[in-house]
Image (cartoon, rainbow, N blue to C red):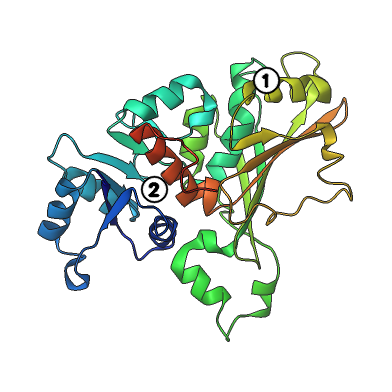
Amino acid sequence: MKTRVFIDGKEGTTGLQIYERFQNRNDVEIMLIDEEKRKDVNERAKMINSSDITFLCLPDAAAIEAASLCTNPDVRIIDASTAHRTNPAWDYGFPELSEKHRENIRNSKRVANPGCYASGFISLVYPLVKAGVLPEDYPVTCHAVSGYSGGGKKMIAAMESENKTKEMYSPRQYALGQKHKHIPEMQAVCRLKYKPMFNPIVDDYYNGMVVSVPLVTRCLTKKYTPENIHEIMAEHYLGQHFVKVMELGGTETLPDGFIAANTLAGTNNMQIFVCGNEDQILLMSRFDNLGKGASGAAIQNMNIMLGINEATGLE
């Protein structure tokens, strides 16, 4: 029997990506809402409650409304918005963080899909907190670069417009007031005492992302070397299918000393790098903001919830 899937917000970037990823799967039946009724609350409620799994690819307020429309206790919801990521009633959809996370997702009726930047940050910081590397008052800083698809339909249209300004051809840092919408989830999931400083940059390419977290070793709970941190990360992600810790220093993967942000575009893979020296260590997470950072992660979570191979439809 096919799994009946409804994508509420199929017209958005993430919704379209999820829809396209299902096109070659014969185990899924996509429920399509009539175009003229896609904003009709009653019709959406009907579709949600008739589905086995509903994906919410909506702005936060609309996602909260959509979740409230579900009255069928058998329906399982995966929310791709920011709305429920720090809500304790929802399970956080990053299975590689721990077996507890994966088990919670497997049994969940409500999964909050991680944010793209947050996925990279949490992949680096969560294992360090768990291992006791970071003191609770450590001033965590994060730098990140993403392709412009992460900005959604409006930014995509602007970046691909004939009227594109010269500034749009360059990297542009934003969220300068330190109020980016991913910060609460970054802090909450990693259980940080203080908010991290987060410096995101959007650049003139479509998709792919690198998230970096620098460590000053004299400020850690004890003296750690790059080898120590690499061992901690490798042990944490041992045996994971999509998340891989690369060789120390990236010497084989990054032979020219450059890390490109679009290398994993079109995949659900994530690569983690540990570089630096005994005084300063640089952690980096590379992945696709539309893959492991959005639609790929959502489908991986659905596969886990269905009890099937989590790589189904993702390779």
Q: Residue 291, labelled with which disc?
A: none
Count of numbered labels shown in the rendering: 2
Q: Is residue 120 visible?
A: yes
Residue at the image position 32 percent from the left and 32 percent from the top: 90
Q: In which image quadrant can residue 108 be found?
A: top left
Question: Looking at the picture, how far across and down is residue 57, in whole percent?
Answer: 35, 54
Note whether 20 is above or below 91 in the view shown. below
Residue at the image position 46 percent from the left and 37 percent from the top: 310
**Mark 2 falls on what kind of element?**
loop
Q: Residues within 10 Å of mark 1 (few under 14, many from 20)?
A: few
Question: What amino acid is found at the position of numbered circle 1 in the picture?
Answer: Glu
Q: Which residue is mark 2?
A: 80
Mark 1 / mark 2, whichever is N-terminal? 2
Question: Looking at the picture, how far across and down is residue 127, in whole percent?
Answer: 61, 24
Question: What amino acid is found at the position of numbered circle 2 in the picture?
Answer: Ala
Note whether 214 is above or below 233 in the view shown. below
Q: In which image quadrant can residue 215 be found?
A: top right
Q: Which residue is mark 1?
A: 235
Is 223 left or right of 13, judged from the image as shown?
right
